[in-house]
Image (cartoon, coloured by chain):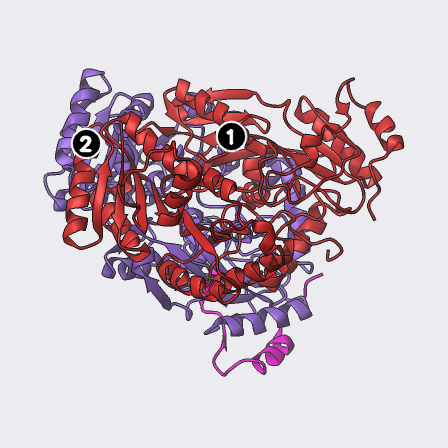
Chain colours: A purple, B red
Amino acid sequence: MLTSCDAGFLSQLSGLLPPGTLAAPEPRYLEEPRGRLAGQAGAVALPRNVDEVSVILRACHAAHVPVVPYGGGTGLVGGQVATTGAVPLVLSLERMQAIRDIYPSENVLIAEAGAVLADVQNAAASAARLFPLSLASEGSARIGGLLACNAGGVNVLRYGNARDLVLGLEVVLADGRIWNGLKRLRKDNTGYDLRHLMIGSEGTLGVITAASLRLSPRPAKQGAALMVVTGPDAALELLALAQDRIGGGISAFELIAGMGLSFLAETMPQVRQPFAQAPDWMVLIDLGLPEALDPTDALEGLFSEAHEKGLVSDGVIAASLAQRKDFWNLRESIPEANRHIGAISSHDISLPLSEISTFISRAGPELARINTYRINCFGHLGDGNLHYNIFPVAGVDRRAHEQERACIKTCVHDLVHEMGGSVSAEHGIGRLKARDLVTYGDPVKLAAMRAIKHALDPHGIMNPGAVLVDGEM
Amino acid sequence: MLTSCDAGFLSQLSGLLPPGTLAAPEPRYLEEPRGRLAGQAGAVALPRNVDEVSVILRACHAAHVPVVPYGGGTGLVGGQVATTGAVPLVLSLERMQAIRDIYPSENVLIAEAGAVLADVQNAAASAARLFPLSLASEGSARIGGLLACNAGGVNVLRYGNARDLVLGLEVVLADGRIWNGLKRLRKDNTGYDLRHLMIGSEGTLGVITAASLRLSPRPAKQGAALMVVTGPDAALELLALAQDRIGGGISAFELIAGMGLSFLAETMPQVRQPFAQAPDWMVLIDLGLPEALDPTDALEGLFSEAHEKGLVSDGVIAASLAQRKDFWNLRESIPEANRHIGAISSHDISLPLSEISTFISRAGPELARINTYRINCFGHLGDGNLHYNIFPVAGVDRRAHEQERACIKTCVHDLVHEMGGSVSAEHGIGRLKARDLVTYGDPVKLAAMRAIKHALDPHGIMNPGAVLVDGEM
């Protein structure tokens, strides 16, 4: 049984910490970006270093007080807001935002968990290196939260998920013990890989306080193109062709649906549309190449061969880095246009690459049996990751479809599951998908997860209700 | 307490399995490549499918009989041979060697644990794809064992360690339950990453029975060069320069010491030496490039700039694929030459890249205080992974130094540890390094490992004595 973070506990805890470490929770700690959940907190702890985190967790462990680790608050599955049960202590890492060290010759940077992603990217850039994790919320998302939910983003195709960018971690376990695992090694086979266990565990096993991150050389030349494809299958063939022709130089390969362009035209007319007539499907291809290769040549050659093969019908290659930025601005504006329209239901799914086209052709008709919707399907095609979002028809407010949401979700997730996909590709489970994990997860894996959770957090204080549903430990 | 695999248990187990599943252990199951350990086994189980593995583990779990999973028997740390304690059942995966499926358009291949690495490489090649895991024992090492110890090899720089090539796993847990985790997804954030926990756990948490493996496009063009460098520091600068110039096209970057060439000349004179006078240090650079780039141009350009910067003094670029193969044959012959000379002590270590040169300059003089040795230091420089091996001077047998072995090992490992390195870069812990893990491992990580071990294998039947030292659970 957990105990609420009450005045008695806070008074005892504050005696163990420097003044100003505990504060009343501002509203931002209790909200999440889509406004679907409202959190509760007895207080916010704002530690300055790993030892203070250790003191806090040791006290919570001893008193059975729940702890919700808090990064930038940008998570989309409610992992950062506890809504029910004993009132938790929110543990924000925002004061631990140092770049502790940077080793350009090793391509390594050590950042504290509270460092904002954009600051880490900039620190890498100022050492002429690249930290390739990149996603829409990079101006506010923090390293600890990004690792806790193994963030994805646009460069996974080339550089991997967040977990693939981590060489080592510093973690405070549930009982306050500190694991000093900040190695800077590319090969280290000394025991179980706790690093990968902590990454993606969404704060339910411990608190990541710092990470040793893998940097990359900055590509000498960048380029991008938008190409109109005949459909998602053609887009995948185009990707394979591009990989054969350009090797590892493809940094991103994003699928954009005509519906997204139409939403943009409707809600953000200031964003310039690339084609006079909005195509049904197009892709954004982004390249980062060594000095000896020219991005324009590479993209022209690719377009030409793809056109011969009937994969693409039109295209535009960025003539400058400014135009490349425009292409990305278009891509990054689609989620904003989606918010203006107002989704009934959003789905962060992944599929085996060869199933994507079948999924798209099956999901539309199945949803049409529920009601008539507009579907905006876009995402990181090279990773098999679609953001498959359902909207009302023009002029209708999403609230009119509120009672259909559960049914829509089940329809999409059932199909994804049947086709060997994942109902959470890059956002995690949090609280919003904890029941889905029970429904769609492998039961043996779930049992193993519960055993591990119990082994590392026997009192269940770490982010209760996230990932593993309450009471089923 | 564990119970030996005796006649009574075997009689009961054989009743649960098809005829011919259990056999008397041939000597090969009780040996390891360096002959340092002699194993014991009550029998060998040779299951044909995952359900038989499940039956076997369920029975062993119920009877508390230890199980030693067995792949190709090529491990170098004794993970495959139990020497003490209750007599185990050896569980060999050699009959489960099917390539279950291959999805060329997804770059995915599903292999059973008993598939030999070379067979997986060939299956990928026959679908015009690359499975990039590559190491000296690829003709006999099996996928299950390679994943159990997170094998490294020569292509880690470009493609990652074995764990980075795995999208999903099928695993039988200690109590016989089957986790069906053979996903083919590049993004899947649904709960704790059991895949990475199993990979590298060396058969102590369960038995990997199949894996969904990530393939890559085959580079259109290959090339290689040997370049004489002024030292390990220059080699690292050369690597950085190569990465800036050639991007991700560098597949391998191997450091070779003059001592290795001298051992080759002494024991394998048939291997052609690349330079009239053996240099103190050289590197083998291997490239895999897209169609639009020429490897010879790339290597000539690199050599020219590196020569201007004083990093390289001589070099030879492979004029043909046959010559490239010769270069690799030279590299791969060095471990064989080492065996002919007979190492007193071998060390599979890794270091932060910027510490490599300092390590090499410090380790020699420290070892010289013990006695006079020849040192062959070679390895996967781009990964910071050195094989640092100690030999007697010419004409002396290694047995003359037998009593110095422990002292040599401590000297090397202490220094590696002090410099933030790892005492097991790519071979794992097994039984030979289990004590080192206690000495050099982070105590909090070790405690967490023991808690996880106990949670997933409460009777301790899985590969007892490997990774975690007996009696310290």
Tell me which numbered mark, 2 or 1, is placed earlier along the sequence.
1
Chain letter for the residue marked with disc 1 in the picture: B
Q: Amino acid at mark 2?
A: Asp
User: In whole angstroms, how far apart are the C-alphas of marks 2 and 1?
Assistant: 33 Å
Chain letter for the residue marked with disc 2 in the picture: B
Mark 1 Cα-neighbour bin, 10 Å: few <14, some 14–19, many ≥20? many
- Residue A2 lies in magenta, yes or no? yes
Q: Nearer the viewer, mark 2 or mark 1?
A: 2
- The tag on residue B294 is 2
Give how far across and how far down residue B175 sits, in percent: 74, 38
- Residue B136 lies in magenta, yes or no? no
Q: Is residue B248 above or below residue B218?
A: below
Judging by the rendered image, the residue that carries numbered circle 1 is B212
Query: Foreground residue, A373 or A56?
Result: A56
Furthest residue toward left = A319
Q: Is residue A310 above or below residue B212?
A: above
Q: Residue at x 54, y 56 (%)?
A: A203
Query: Which residues, given as a range, are shown in magenta?
Result: A1-30
Q: Secondary structure at mark 1?
A: strand
